[in-house]
Image: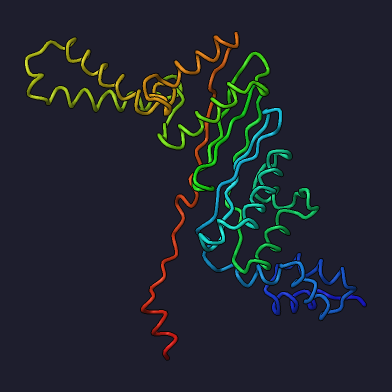
Amino acid sequence: MSFTAKDVALLREKTGAGMMDCKKALTEVNGDMKKAEEFLREQGVAVAAKKASRVASEGAVWASVAKDGKAGALVEINCESDFVAKSPDFQELCSEIADIVSASNPKDNDALLSLKGKSKLTVQELLNTATAKIGEKMSLRHFVRYESKGYIGSYIHLGGKIGILVEYETNKDLSKNKEFTALANDIAMHIAAFNPQYVDSTSIPKEFEASELEILRNQAMNDPKSQGKPEQVIEGMVKGRYKKQLAEICLVEQPFVRGMTESVSVVLDKIAKAEKAEIKIIRFERLVMGEGLEKKTDNLAEEVAKLSK
């Protein structure tokens, strides 16, 4: 049985699925409209299409790092409720998609949706199937992937509320060194807790530095206690205050989360000396689940009123 473009359009109208999905379904069942509808339901495509307009503002950030620590990824997958986000099925979905990103290095979301993982389903098919099984809209929001000759560390906070990825530059393989990998995990945890903005002072944009120095300079000049003091004294005050600010926004300058007595750089240097290695933090990513998304709010009184009509 063959089919036409009108058949594809009719199937799309009936199911809400995309044109390409409808064409694929009709091809699979040799143009049988009823079987095509069943095919789309089985694949979860029709269910996913019907839920496409719903708000998916919950979910989780998940991490995957290669065994040798040379590649790693974070993904954010969204669903509709916090209850589903904590379920084993949803977290398994996040884990498989994160593994695909880490191993395959897709260039963007569209490319990722067409890739296959261990289940032999594409990411889009995984999302559709999960939507059909769980009953909530599932969507891929974004991902981050690092690849390094050194080491990639990661950390997931509170079951997926915050995800961290950190790249280290090293001159020797430390992926099997338990002290280093434990510290890498702790530094990622530190980033989750303290939210540094930059790795160190060299990674701060010149525009930001100039702007902050100007603000601090104006503050000092307007301070009554600074009146009459030489310009070089005021400039010394400004630089001192800026240095203090760096300790708040730069990762390596912050007091390390374990103990809070030494900075991150000091703790990292100790491991480097002990292992006779060079270790440097190159970059990090801190993904917060749902950041920037509009949350769905339910009004219980309104829902009860609707039911009573």
Residue 249 is left or right of residue 227, and the answer is right
The image position of residue 168, as x and y in percent, is 58, 23
The image position of residue 260, as x and y in percent, is 37, 25
Q: In which quarter of the image is the N terminus?
A: bottom right
Figure check: 89 above or below 43: above
Q: Residue at x 80, y 72 (%)?
A: 39
Residue closer to the observer: 237 or 167:
167
Residue closer to the observer: 9 or 123:
123
Q: Confirm whether residue 205 shows in the render.
A: no
Figure check: 177 above or below 5: above
Q: Residue at x 78, y 53 (%)?
A: 119
Residue closer to the observer: 26 or 68:
68
Figure check: 256 above or below 163: above
Q: Which residue is drawn at 59% across and 30% down?
A: 153
Residue closer to the observer: 155 or 291:
155
Residue 190 is left or right of residue 63, and the answer is left
Answer with the quarter of the image where residue 178 lies. top right
Answer with the quarter of the image where residue 122 lies. bottom right
Answer with the quarter of the image where residue 74 lies. top right
The image position of residue 284, as x and y in percent, is 52, 31
Figure check: 10 above or below 191: below
In the current view of this chain or complex, which residue is farthest to the right?
A: 1
The image position of residue 56, as x and y in percent, is 53, 61
Q: In which quarter of the image is the C terminus?
A: bottom left
